[in-house]
Image: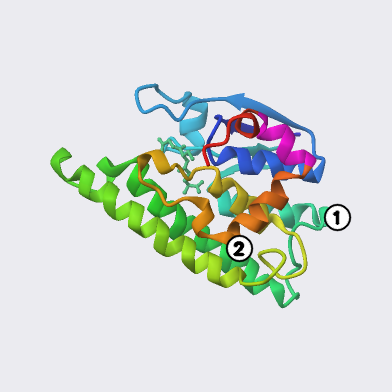
Amino acid sequence: MYKLFYAPESASMGVRVLLEEIGAPYELIQTTVAMDTPRPPEQLAINPNGWVPVLLWEGGAMYECAAITVFLCDRHPEAGLAPAVEDPARATYLQTLVYFSNSVQNAFQLTYYPDRFVDAPVDEPSAHRRGNRRLRETWMIINDQIGDNEWMLGQRFSAADIYLFMLTTWLNSAIGHPAISEFSNAKRIADKVLQRSSVQHVYQPWVENPEY
Ligand SMILES: N[C@@H](CCC(=O)N[C@@H](CS)C(=O)NCC(=O)O)C(=O)O
């Protein structure tokens, strides 16, 4: 039985989709991403940064969405969500997950948490604007990487496609983000991932009211 510290509209949703795809039993522990609300001490004991996702299982606990993705897919190879260690597609799989985490998500952070990147509040709008541009740059890298491919790894669906879908749901043109329509290859994959029953289930509120 897995336990997942969980908040709507957060990176914990992608991990929940993975657990659904794997078919593993799990329990959600509701928490928050609100900046003015304290995190449960049990969450902070595992992740002192205070962010989600945080995953627990009988043998341990961990945080960082990309790391959790690799961990879960390796632990449940029968789900077929990731290339095995000796598979040549493993390189692109790992590269893409880490790029999502350290470059695309970092650009999102500049726009959602500009205070973490500048000394003075007066500089926050500048950080936000740079984040908006950085989002366009990093999404274009991903879009070009996809090219004519059916999925992130070519012909096969993988956890990298679920991760991509999750990140597209964070795009919000109301705060200056580029629109997903600018990245037609990424949109093509996101639209297909959205059809999966796991995604329809986990993202039901978003499906009813998507931002883009
Ligand atoms: N590098 C982390 C970042 C996760 C992250 O940014 N989580 C956000 C929600 S999407 C969060 O918990 N924000 C609240 C906070 O940072 O205090 C990961 O990929 O797991």
Q: Is 201 included in the stretch rendered in magenta?
A: yes
x, y percent for residue 21: 78, 45
Amino acid type, residue under disc 1 in the picture: Glu
Residue sitting at 85 percent across and 55 percent down? 78
Q: Is residue 66 left or right of residue 83?
A: left
Give the answer, above or below, for where 14 lies relative to 81.
above
Mark 2 or mark 1: which is in front?
A: 2
Q: Predominant secondary structure in magenta?
A: helix
Q: Residues within 10 Å of mark 2 (few under 14, many from 20)?
A: many
The residue under the point 22% across, 44% down is 125
Decide if residue 62 is in sight here: yes
Counting from the top left corner in percent of width and height, residue 207 is at 65, 34
Residue 167: x %, y % from top left: 54, 49
- The correct choice, above or below, for 79 with respect to 38 in the image is below
Coordinates of residue 156 in the picture (x, y in percent): 77, 65
* Marker disc for residue 78: 1
Q: Is residue 180 magenta-colored?
A: no
The tally of labels here is 2
Between 203 and 90, the one nearer to me in the picture: 203
Which numbered dot is residue 185? 2
